[in-house]
């Protein structure tokens, strides 16, 4: 009944996922192309300063058109699956709520955990595909000694996307293929050209897919207006680390730890956001040296290379996507909770972002940053 | 080669061989512009007028009351925008096809007209009394469909026609899904305008017709030559019109042979065996339906996944309405009938055409139950906790 040769490729209409479909097809695998319809860009058009015609990247008709053309070129069946409701519930709302709570969220990880490697995997299996392949730059492999599926950094570290994939479970990893893990971006583009794919020269997308132009503040305001929540008061005081009130701010969502611009206060020396207090809505500002912390607590931790943490472990830790992994000790402090102690203090550890732990190129696991000290 | 069975005839139908044969000469040897005075024009003019008579016989009406259009959507738009003027009130329903629904929406969005949407009951039926109550002094037009594209439910159009006539209001009905499937009589219905579409009754895509009762003051939407008695400018699409004429002729003959009863027998067998599955039900139960359509919900599944899984095994069916990207949205028709979003999304439409055989039904019955079972097995939310009654 189940054909182990059939692979569903998550196709976004971009170069990477298109190249994946082409590669697998060239290998003679049975391939089905799937595009997830996640967000309707027209929905917020005209709301609270959003342009009437939104040029966002996510799930635009142009991207679906591109993906469909690639599927036609490759001669594979192709379908669009609608996951808008689940995307809003599990990605967009948490994204908005995190900002309102003074944290700086990363929706891509939530999307990977709840949509791409959950919902899409279910649909793939239901339609007869055993595995899902994506265009992420990462590697997955089974380690017989540990009896674990491992997630590893890709050959091209400059394209490493493991930071967004730390939430994958063993079951999900066992059903996932990352065919681009051993390739560089120029090689991927060349492969797309060789297969005469019209999207071979399409530029990479960098921004959060559902936030047009990367302007998340305008997105938040438009979304809250649409939801009838625009009156929620998230304004508060601007204070120094000594507790001195030096001004007011219009909303915690305007700030992120480490931010220097747009604080609206004038002082002699440069000031940075060093903390956002969720309970009092105070934004704490201070000097650059106050931004550094030695430790962080991470919650909702998912472990990949090991089933449990019995004793402290030496790892390197990434605290944001473009961060160079820094050496640290990791110890368990409770179920799905760890304490990370860095060898050297790290700048601007930001609640809401992920901390991902590595042993060389192997992803040990990751969790959500709760607090730093 | 994988066997493929097509049970999505409410989306479109294949052009039947006899219809294609009738059309073929008009792509080549008979190429004239039907407005030309010479021999070539006379040949195609005769073909267009012959087709007009065949379509008129199907409804039945006078040939002069038929306006050929570029399809069902154009005919619906011509009926609505051709009659509704600024300040008029229009009555429609919550289950119309987008060709009517979005045309009415445009009337309100452009602030030209107020529109009242009549709801349906759990069977998908409009109550003519609701229509009567909605009529105002400035009501110009009632536009309510004949048979629904998703459920096949046939509306009480004759009763609505009586209401319209009693109030001196124009009545348009979109009969795209009724034509060729059940007998239509514009005089019995009492409608002033009626839409049909070629490709839903085995003629090609891109041709339709609007019945316009003699004396109805219809403004054209397209301006140009005096084609179609100045109601629809543009050189006639002769091959397609010939195809529509032939399709109407075959449909009329089919009713005499009892084709509709044969189709109902096949549909009923399909439906009966599907409904014997666990946690499955019929949408539109208790209402009169066209003989080719059955719309069934399979609780606990995503209709979208079922459609894809079946397509990969060679069976073409559909669910809801596709949005611009091709993704499926919960059907506005099923939610208007009171179905939950989950149940609307778990609903699948099977629609038969004249080319389908009993073997096609066997093929569907061999595939659907096992596929539904597989989807439920892999669904994270099935089985749900038992509901105590």
Image (cartoon, helix red, strand yellow):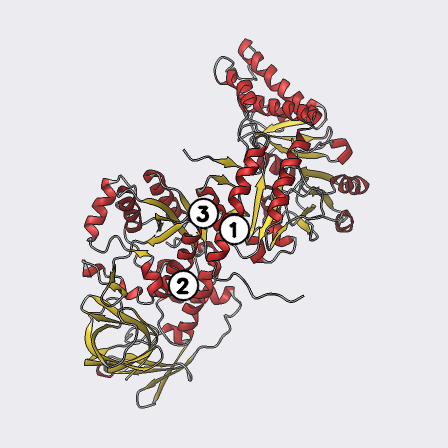
User: For the point 45% across and 42% down, which residue is it?
Assistant: B313
Q: In the image, which disc is placed on residue A230?
A: none
Q: In the image, which disc is placed on residue B325?
A: 3
Residue B354, position in %: x, y?
A: 59, 30
| Crowd rating for badge 1 (residues with CA inside 10 Å; few <14, some 14–19, many 20+) | many
Query: What residue did someone put label 2 on?
Result: A114
Pinpoint the chain carrying mark 1. Answer: B
User: Considering the numbered disc 1 on the image, is that residue within a helix, a strand or a loop?
Assistant: helix
Can marks 2 and 1 be said to lie on one chain?
no
- The answer to whether residue A224 is left or right of residue A297 is right
Q: Is residue A251 above or below residue A69?
A: below
Query: What residue did someone put label 1 on?
Result: B372
Residue A164, position in %: x, y?
A: 31, 64
User: For the point 27% across and 47% down, which residue is it?
Assistant: A19
Q: CA distance from mark 1 to mark 3?
A: 25 Å
* Residue B219 appears anywhere in the view: no
Q: CA distance from mark 2 to mark 1?
A: 24 Å
């Amino acid at each position: 009944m189940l054909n182990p040769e059939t692979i569903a490729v998550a196709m976004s209409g971009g170069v990477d996922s298109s190249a994946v479909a082409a590669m697998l097809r060239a290998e003679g695998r049975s391939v089905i192309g799937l595009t997830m319809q996640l967000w309707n860009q027209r929905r917020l058009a005209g709301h609270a300063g959003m342009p009437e015609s939104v040029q966002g990247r996510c799930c635009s008709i142009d991207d679906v058109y591109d993906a469909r053309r690639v599927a036609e070129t490759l001669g594979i069946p192709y379908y669009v699956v609608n996951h808008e409701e689940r995307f809003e519930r599990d990605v967009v709302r948490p994204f908005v709520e995190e900002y309102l709570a003074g944290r700086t969220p990363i929706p891509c990880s939530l999307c990977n955990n709840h949509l791409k490697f959950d919902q899409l995997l279910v649909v793939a299996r239901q339609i007869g595909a055993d595995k899902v392949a994506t265009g992420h730059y990462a590697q997955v492999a089974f380690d017989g000694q540990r009896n674990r599926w491992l997630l590893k950094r890709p050959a091209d570290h400059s394209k490493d996307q493991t930071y967004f994939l730390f939430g994958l479970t063993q079951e999900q990893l066992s059903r996932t293929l990352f065919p681009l893990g051993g390739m560089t971006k120029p090689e991927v583009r060349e492969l797309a050209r060789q297969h005469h794919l019209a999207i071979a020269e399409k530029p990479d997308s960098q921004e959060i897919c559902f936030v047009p132009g990367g302007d998340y503040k305008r997105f938040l305001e438009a979304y809250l207006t649409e939801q009838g929540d625009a009156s929620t008061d998230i304004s508060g005081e601007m204070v120094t680390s000594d507790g001195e009130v030096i001004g007011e701010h219009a909303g915690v969502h305007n700030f992120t730890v480490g931010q220097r611009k747009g604080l609206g206060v004038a002082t002699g020396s440069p000031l940075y956001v060093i903390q956002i207090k969720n309970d009092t809505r105070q934004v704490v500002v201070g000097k650059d040296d106050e931004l550094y912390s030695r430790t962080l607590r991470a919650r909702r931790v998912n472990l990949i290379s090991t089933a449990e943490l019995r004793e402290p472990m030496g790892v390197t830790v990434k605290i944001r996507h473009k961060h160079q992994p820094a050496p640290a000790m990791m110890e368990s402090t409770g179920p799905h909770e760890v304490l990370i102690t860095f060898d050297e203090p790290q700048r601007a550890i930001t609640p809401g972002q992920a901390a991902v732990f590595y042993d060389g190129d192997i992803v040990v696991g990751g969790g959500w940053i709760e607090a730093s000290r | 080669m994988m066997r493929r069975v097509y049970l999505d005839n409410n989306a479109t139908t294949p052009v039947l061989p006899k219809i294609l044969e009738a059309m073929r000469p008009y792509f080549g040897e008979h190429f004239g512009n039907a407005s030309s005075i010479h021999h070539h024009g006379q040949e195609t003019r005769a073909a267009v007028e012959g087709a007009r008579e065949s379509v008129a016989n199907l409804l039945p009406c006078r040939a002069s009351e038929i306006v050929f259009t570029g399809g069902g959507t154009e005919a619906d738009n011509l009926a609505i925008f051709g009659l509704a003027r600024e300040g008029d009130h229009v009555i429609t329903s919550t289950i119309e096809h987008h060709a009517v629904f979005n045309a009415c929406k445009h009337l309100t969005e452009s602030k030209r007209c107020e529109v009242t949407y009549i709801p349906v009951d759990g069977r998908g039926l409009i109550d003519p009394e609701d229509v009567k109550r909605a009529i105002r002094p400035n009501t110009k037009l009632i536009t309510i469909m004949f048979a629904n594209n998703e459920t096949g439910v046939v509306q009480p159009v004759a009763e609505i026609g009586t209401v319209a006539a009693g109030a001196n209001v124009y009545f348009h009905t979109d009969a795209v899904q009724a034509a060729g499937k059940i007998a239509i009589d514009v005089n019995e219905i009492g409608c002033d305008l009626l839409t049909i579409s070629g490709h839903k009754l085995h003629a090609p895509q891109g041709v339709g017709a609007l019945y316009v009762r003699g004396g109805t003051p219809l403004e054209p939407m397209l301006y140009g030559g005096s084609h179609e008695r100045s109601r629809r400018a543009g050189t006639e699409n002769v091959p397609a019109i010939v195809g529509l004429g032939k399709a109407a002729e075959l449909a009329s003959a089919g009713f005499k042979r009892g084709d509709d009863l044969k189709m109902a027998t096949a549909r009923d067998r399909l439906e009966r065996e599907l409904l014997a599955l666990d946690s499955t039900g019929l949408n539109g139960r208790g209402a009169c339906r066209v003989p080719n359509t059955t719309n069934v919900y399979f609780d606990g599944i995503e209709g979208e996944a079922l459609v894809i899984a079946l397509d990969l095994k060679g069976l073409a069916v559909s669910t809801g309405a596709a949005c611009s990207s091709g993704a499926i949205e919960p059907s506005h028709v099923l939610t208007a009938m009171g179905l939950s979003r989950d149940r609307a999304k778990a609903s699948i439409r099977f629609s038969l055409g004249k080319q389908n055989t009993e073997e096609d039904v066997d093929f569907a019955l061999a595939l659907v139950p096992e596929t539904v079972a597989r989807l439920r097995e892999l669904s994270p939310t099935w089985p749900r906790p038992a509901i105590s009654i």
